[in-house]
Structures are given as C-alpha cells and as structure tokens.
Image: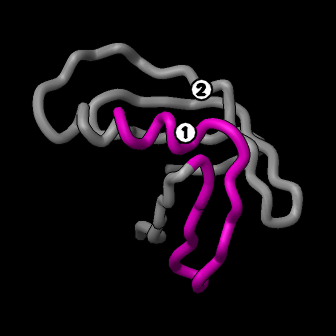
C-alpha cells in the first residue's frame, strides 16, 4: 500500500486498486476506490474481500513506530509494515 500526493494505491493480493485519500490529524478518509476486476482463486481474493471494505470510510491512524502503523475503523483493523 502506497500513499502519495493524496492518492492511495496498491495490490490487494489479486487486483490493483487506487483512489483518493485525505488525512486530518489521526483521521484517514479513503475513497472511492477503483480496482481492476480479475477473478482469482484462493487467498488473494479472500484478502480483497476483507481489505476493500476495511479501507472505505474514515479510519483512525495509530503510528506504532517509524516502520509500522495501524488503521482502525468500521470494525476492522489493518496493520501496515514498511517494505524496503
């Protein structure tokens, strides 16, 4: 997952996605998102079915360290770790 210039983008295991985001203090608002529409079998599709609903709306950002942050909202929690 990448954040740059008010835009979020990434790959959810099967399909690529992107869309606008805004950050106000520790409140992150995402969406609407667009994504490719490949049908995949197995874990990639399962990841998408969890990730996309979790990202939409407003999330609370908790920076745990320079390498990790957690996004919480809508009954979901996403932990992101910095990739090299």
Mark number for residue 82? none
| 49 to 81, vertically: above or below | above
| 70 to 32, vertically: above or below | below
Q: Secondary structure at mark 1?
A: strand
Q: Quadrant of residue 48?
A: top left
Residue interval drawn in magenta: 49-74
Residue at the (88%, 56%) spot, across then down: 24
Residue furthest out toward the right: 24
Residue at the (22%, 37%) spot, across then down: 44
Residue at the (59%, 26%) spot, across then down: 33
Residue at the (58%, 85%) spot, across then down: 65
Q: Crowding near pointer 1: few (<14 within 10 Å), some, many (20+)?
A: some
| Residue 5 left/right relative to 62 | right
Residue furthest out toward the bottom: 65
| Residue 14 left/right relative to 30 | left
Q: Is residue 70 magenta?
A: yes
- For disc 2, the marked residue is 33
Residue 68 percent coordinates (x, y)? 52, 76
Q: Marks 1 and 2, how far apart in space?
A: 9 Å
| 22 to 35, vertically: above or below | below
- For disc 1, the marked residue is 9
Residue 49 percent coordinates (x, y)? 35, 33
Residue 21 percent coordinates (x, y)? 74, 41
């Amino acid at each position: 997952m990448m954040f740059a210039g008010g835009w979020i983008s990434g790959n959810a295991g099967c399909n690529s996605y992107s869309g606008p985001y805004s950050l106000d203090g520790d409140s992150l608002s995402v969406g609407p998102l667009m994504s490719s529409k490949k049908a995949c079998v197995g874990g990639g599709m399962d990841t998408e079915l969890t990730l996309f609903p979790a990202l939409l709306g407003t999330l609370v950002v908790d920076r745990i360290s320079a390498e990790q942050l957690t996004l919480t909202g809508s009954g979901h929690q996403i932990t992101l770790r910095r990739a090299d």
